[in-house]
Every structure is written in C-alpha cells, then in structure tokens.
Image: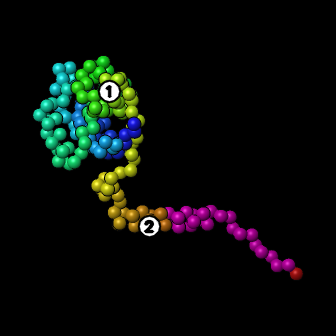
Amino acid sequence: MVIRIPYRVARIIVDDARAQVPNEACGLIAGDGKTIQSAIPLSNVASSKGSSFSLEPKEQLGALKRLDAENLVWMGVYHSHPNSAAIPSSADLEEVSDHGLLQLIVSLEKHKPELQLWRIGASGVMPLELIFETQSDARFDDATAPSQKQRAAIVAAAIISVILMLAISFTLLPPAPEITSFP
C-alpha cells in the first residue's frame, strides 16, 4: 500500500515533534485514504511522555469533529521517537487500540528527521510506502511567490548583470592588431 503526504503536512508533524522534545509528540492524521491531507497535533497525556504517548481524549474528540466537518477520513495517528528509530516500540505495539488505523512515526534520533508509516494489525507489523509530495499547494505558493514587481526587478538585475559582464569583457580584451593593406 502506498500513501502520499504533502511536504506541508510532513512539516507540521516534524515541527510538532521538535517542539515536544524530550517528550513524544502525538496527533491525528487524516485525508482521503490515499493521501494524508491533514495533521492535527494533540497533547500527550501519557504518564511517561518521554517514551510513550496517549492522546488527550477531549482534544481527540474535537479533532475528530473537525475532520468530519472538513470531510476528511481519520487515517491514523502520528507520534515521535525523540531518541530512537522510526519503528514501532514494544509500547507502541501493546497500546494499539484500532488495527485499522495507520501509525506514522517520526524519528529525531539523527539530525535529519525520518518519517515511516506502519500498519499494525492482528497479523503483524507492516511498513507502508510513504511518498512525499514536493508540489506545494496554492495557499503556500501565494505566500512565498515573488510579486510582479519583484519578478521585474529580478529580470532587470539579470539584464544589467549581462550588460556589465559584456562591458567588462570588452575592456579586458587586448587591442585589435593593426590591419595593413597589401599592395
């Protein structure tokens, strides 16, 4: 099974994981069943937050209502492993309550975060392929795209740079040899 995740959603999850260190971060993931379109960070209310997670029930209920209002399917949960790999721990395996939900684990063990998606079911633990979509959505593009004036300034700067480079090149050329006429 292949699941897609846009970069902006992965960024929400990684940012939450980093903000919660040394504790595990947790939240819900939702989408259309094939693409994770939303991540909702929730409070971790586990007694040992550094090595396990438990979603805050009232926040979870509110998040599920929000997903329903947005016509998104609850696909699973995410949580972080601040000091270990992105593989399910024994605690993760013991605490699975719904075998139909996916588990997205983000590891902060190394400098670069690692995200791995899992299906933990009665038949065992299966890694799933997670494809990161680098295409940004329109809201993100509008916020970061250069304005028309900025684009014009970039083009003008490029043209001026080319003209200056040509002018400098011509001034550095040796003088042309004299042309003598032949009788």
Q: Quadrant of residue 94?
A: top left
Q: Is residue 6 left or right of residue 71?
A: right
Q: Quadrant of the C terminus?
A: bottom right
Mark 2 sits on what residue?
Answer: 156
Is the residue 8 above or below the residue 96 in the image? below
Most distant residue in the front direction: 123
Whether 6 is among the magenta residues is no
Is residue 36 at all visible to an observer of this figure? no
Q: Residue at x 35, y 33 (%)?
A: 117
Is the residue 90 above or below the residue 133 in the image? above
**Which residue is nearer to you in this view: 34 or 176?**
34
Q: Residue at x 32, y 45 (%)?
A: 8
Which residues are the magenta region?
Answer: 161-182
Q: Quadrant of residue 38?
A: top left
| Crowding near the residue tagged with mark 2, few <14, some 14–19, many ≥20 C-alpha atoms within 10 Å | few
> What kind of element bears circle 1?
strand
